[in-house]
Amino acid sequence: MNDLSPVVPATVEIESSLGALPMPKKPEKPTVQEISAFTSAKLDLINWILRDHRPMMNPSAKITAIYLLQCVNSTTLQCNPSYQTIADAMGFKNEKTAERAVKAVKACGWIDIRRFNRNKSNRYVFLANASVAKAIDEYQDHLRDQRKAERESELAKLEQTNLSGRTVPDPTFLSPLEQTNLSGKHLKGTPEVGSLKERGEDLSRHGSVLSSSSPDDVPYPVPASEAEATAMLEQLAAGHALSPGVMKVFRRHMMAGTLTPAMVEQQRKFAA
């Protein structure tokens, strides 16, 4: 594994003879709570074994460990299939393959092998293996935190850039005329037109310049309230799988009077 792997030895010393699966007080008549505790402990073991990525816990060792768990009697906790039985169940070439897999599971600290009679099969006892389980959980938590940090970093980059790939203009530096044009509202009293008339300027020439820009670059009107902004954003996102981060940036630009149809269309294409 890489450097972020759980730091655990290849061979784990048996922590105690106490098994990881709870024993009923009366094996002949287990209670509902005892059966539930047994099932929960077995599922936890399966979860840890599957996430144990040490080299010795290869696929053969993992499926062997899980098979042995399935063989544990829920009342007596007896588990004693022969190597040949394991090989047949797992589809191994021979019982030597099964024996190697069992030894790997034992070396990694998940089971203890006890043999009381040479004429009988081994008895397998599952161990808590607490240090390894803790290392596995901590490694998984680290990976989850790392993915979360990467997502937050990507969202921060998206918010810092304009959706069109250009720098976001600061609305505090817009002149009164620019702010009025961006909001889609007409100038009251049209002072600029009046001044042009007083100077004898050609209004038709100015009008042609103002109308030369594309309609897609004309910003949407600034909403009068948060409710109106939400309604406008829902209408823009209708039928398109836009992420919450994109919608947040849309809202910021809309309230600043800088959100244009071209910017919206660009994000719709990215989400398609």
Image (cartoon, helix red, strand yellow):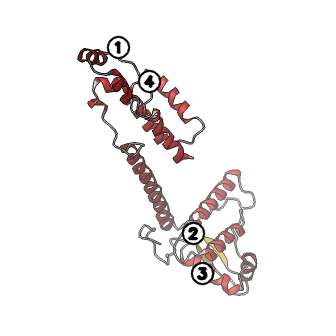
Residue type, label 2: Leu
Whole-angstrom CA distance, mark 1 to mark 2, is 82 Å
Whole-angstrom CA distance, mark 2 to mark 3, is 14 Å
Q: Nearer the viewer, mark 1 or mark 2?
A: 1
Q: Residues within 10 Å of mark 2 (few under 14, many from 20)?
A: many
Nearer to us in this view, 31 or 90 = 90
Drawn side of residue 106 relative to residue 89, left or right: left
Residue type, label 4: Pro
SS assignment at label 4: loop
Q: What residue would you read off at disc 2?
A: 127
Whole-angstrom CA distance, mark 3 to mark 1, is 87 Å
SS assignment at label 2: loop
The quadrant holding residue 88 is: bottom right
Indicate the position of residue 85 as horizontal and vertical percent values.
75, 79
Q: What residue would you read off at disc 1?
A: 188
State which tag comes first along the sequence, 2 or 3. Answer: 3
Q: What residue would you read off at disc 3?
A: 103
Which mark identifies residue 45? none
Drawn side of residue 22 relative to residue 233, left or right: right
